Image (spheres, helix red, strand yellow):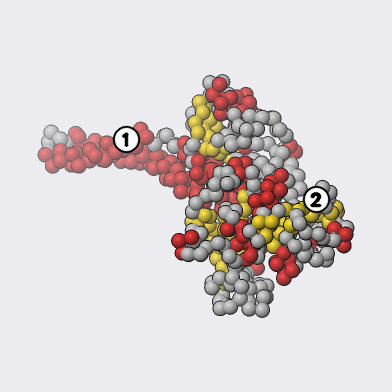
Amino acid sequence: METPAEDTAHSARPVTDAAREAHAVSDEVRSDEVREAQSATAPEVRAVSDAAPEAQAITHAAPKVRAVTQAVREAPIVPDAVHMARAVELAGCGRGATSPNPVVGCVVLDADGNVAGEGFHAYAGGPHAEVGALRAAGERARGGTAYVTLEPCDHTGRTGPCSLALLDAGIARVVVAVADPTPKAAGGGARLRGHGVAVEFGVLAEEAERVNAEWLTYARLGRPYVTWKFAATLDGRSAARDGTSQWITSPEARADVHRLRAESDAIIAGIGTVLTDNPRLTARPTSPANPSLADPSPADPSLARPAARVPLRVVVDSEARTPPGARVLDGEAPALIAIADDIETDLGETDPGVTGRAQTGLGEAGHKTELIRLPRHDGGLDLHALLRELAARQVVSVFLEGGPTLAGSFLRQGLIDRVIAYLAPALLGAGPAALGDAGVATIAGTHRLIFDDISPIGPDLRLTARPVLAPPRKES
């Protein structure tokens, strides 16, 4: 099974592999081929005056000598994209632990172009990627270059501005993949330039955006990034004719789902799923959600991480039908029940753990459960309004688990950013489909996707895809 860091670094691997090949070619060129070319051609040069065949051999050898000479000139230069690819890979190491902050990776070179330090943002409130890389580099950073996946911040929050940290370290050049879209933190590039540091933007921007898609969606659109997950048979059935669905996929696939839940800020289900399956909607990973963050006792106490954030459980329940004894109200994790604003309900009265919009109550395990009211839209609740409410609670990413009706509503409203499908090698022939009405009346309206990953998970397949057309930058 691939780790989260491996998943997020997928697009950077070709560039990283190319870098390794470039270094290998460089080493080979500077040693064996140069000596071989010299030893092969020198005798021929000495023999030119004695024999015409040897002169002809020199003619044939000349292109190889010219190629070797050109390679020697070019080989020591490692492209910016290679170091940025490594920074993208490092950024993925923080996935699932930095919310509501972005994931960021940084590589620092010394003045001679050698890697001096690496770092990534490991958790919210912890050292930023640039600070970690500069600590590792020490004095070697002076006069060097920093590669950062996101523009260095220029404000003081729980940590100081990374722009000042780079200036204090004497960095001479900064290469940035993606500009920071937030007014609060942007401006690091301008500050650095104002102090004479060379700053370049746009190197591997697409790859850096991909690894940081959740936070960039949150920052640009003011709503969480939505991943829709479903499990189905090869003929697209999410349950049998009688409604049973436990289990279509393997234990390995279900463990992978819990890993992805643990990386999310919220888990959303519809009332149909709650009434049918009575799920807990909690993250119960069998191993750390991100193995890159598994060490609980760092040598530097300042790097000690706080307890992992428990995902918020969200039930979309327009008619307030959530039973008082539902497991989503057990207090094991925080919960939010979204109902229509024109519904009268005694849900808060029958279960003291649930209270009104302006207040929160405590479940048995001490986690809060909240009832919010939203306007109706498209036969259900206004999902744009729901996502805005979640964003206001610093929910950066949500994991949508259904069922088919709610998934169809999210897709109709253009609110699905990624699809993760677990397909079991099984056939049912009848039963509910994984997706309900998605607003498609003709084949021309098909929701087209691009595959980002296809991986075996036990006996099943995990397919990861995203919409061909990205959601608009602003809600219409």
User: Mark 2 and mark 1: span between their CA atoms?
Assistant: 70 Å
Give the vertical position of 61 relative to 401 (above or below): above
Give the vertical position of 138 relative to 419 (above or below): above
Residue 75 location, quadrant: top left
- Give the left or right position of residue 53, taking residue 200 as reference: left
Mark 2 or mark 1, earlier in chain: 1
214, 49: nearer the viewer: 214
- Res 109 visible: no
Q: Residue at x 26, y 40 (%)?
A: 64
Q: Residues within 10 Å of mark 1 (few under 14, many from 20)?
A: few
- Residue type at tag 2: Arg
Q: Residue 160: give x, y in percent of width and height.
A: 69, 30
Q: How many numbered marks appear?
A: 2
Callout 2: SS: loop
- Residue type at tag 1: Gln
| Mark 2 or mark 1, whichever is nearer to me | 2
456, 24: nearer the viewer: 456
Q: Residues within 10 Å of mark 2 (few under 14, many from 20)?
A: few
Q: Residue at x 76, y 57 (%)?
A: 342
Callout 1: SS: helix
| Residue that extends furthest to the front in the rendered view of this protein | 342
Q: Which residue is mark 2?
A: 357
Q: Which residue is mark 1?
A: 70
Give the vertical position of 387 relative to 253 (above or below): above
- Res 235 visible: yes
